[in-house]
Amino acid sequence: MPGLDDLYQQLILDHYRRPRHRGTLTDPTIEVDQHNPLCGDELHITVRIVDDQITEIAHAGEGCSISQSSASMMSDAVVGHSVADALTMIEHFRRVMHGDVAADETILGDAIALEGVAKYPVRIKCALLSWMALKDGLINGTPTAQEDQ
Ligand code: ZN
């Protein structure tokens, strides 16, 4: 994707080739499926929550480099945090993707590399997919259709 910082491109590719937290948890607290029909991305996210903390998260599925690397970065960002903190991160990332605020690396971690995706409207949904899936899961506890985009 032209226009993305080289360093950020490398970070995205690194998460795509060596995804963190890849897989599926057994007996998860939350389980969510989401797909992005525009691109064909599919994600299956499982989360373990203990005492209001996200102790484990895993993502599985298929899709483009943006959706898959974003799922890896999102998982890295939220694991070990409280549900409330995770929702704050998700909202920040959503606003970054919509161009409302500048990305804050202290909140997003490696996912700051996706900031440039905001310039590509057709790819924003790819980047947001895992974050919106987690949000749905945390709020509803059950899978839902695509929304909040
Ligand atoms: Zn995609």
Image (cartoon, rainbow, N blue to C red):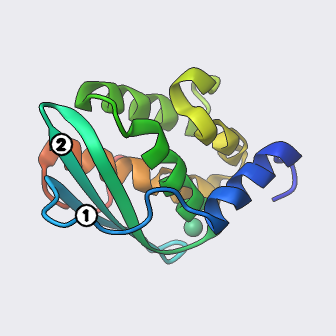
Left or right: residue 108 versus residue 86 is right
The amino acid pointed to by label 1 is Leu
Question: What is the number of the mark on residue 49?
Answer: 2
Whole-percent x and y of residue 98? 56, 37
Q: If the image is split into quadrants, where does the N terminus sit?
A: bottom right
Indicate the secondary structure of the residue bearing disc 1: loop
Question: What is the number of the mark on residue 103?
Answer: none
Quick check: can you spot residue 130? yes
Indicate the secondary structure of the residue bearing disc 2: strand
Left or right: residue 111 versus residue 74 is right
Left or right: residue 18 versus residue 8 is left
The amino acid pointed to by label 2 is Ile
Name the residue nearer the viewer: 141 or 79: 79
Number of labelled discs?
2
Residue beneath the point at 16% across and 58% down: 28
Residue beneath the point at 62% across and 39% down: 110
Quadrant of ligand 1 in image = bottom right
Whole-percent x and y of residue 27? 12, 63
Whole-Å distance between the Cαs marked 2 and 1?
12 Å
Name the residue nearer the viewer: 134 or 29: 29
Name the residue nearer the viewer: 14 or 61: 14
Asked whether disc 2 touches disc 1, contact meaning CB atoms under 8 Å apart, the reply is no
- Vertical arrangement, residue 50 with respect to residue 42, above or below: above
Q: Quadrant of residue 14?
A: bottom right
Quick check: can you spot residue 35? no
Residue beneath the point at 13% across and 50% down: 141
Name the residue nearer the viewer: 20 or 89: 20
Whole-percent x and y of residue 106? 57, 22
Question: What is the number of the mark on residue 25?
Answer: 1
Whole-percent x and y of residue 66? 62, 60
How many residues crowd mark 2 within 10 Å: few (<14), some (14–19), many (20+)? some
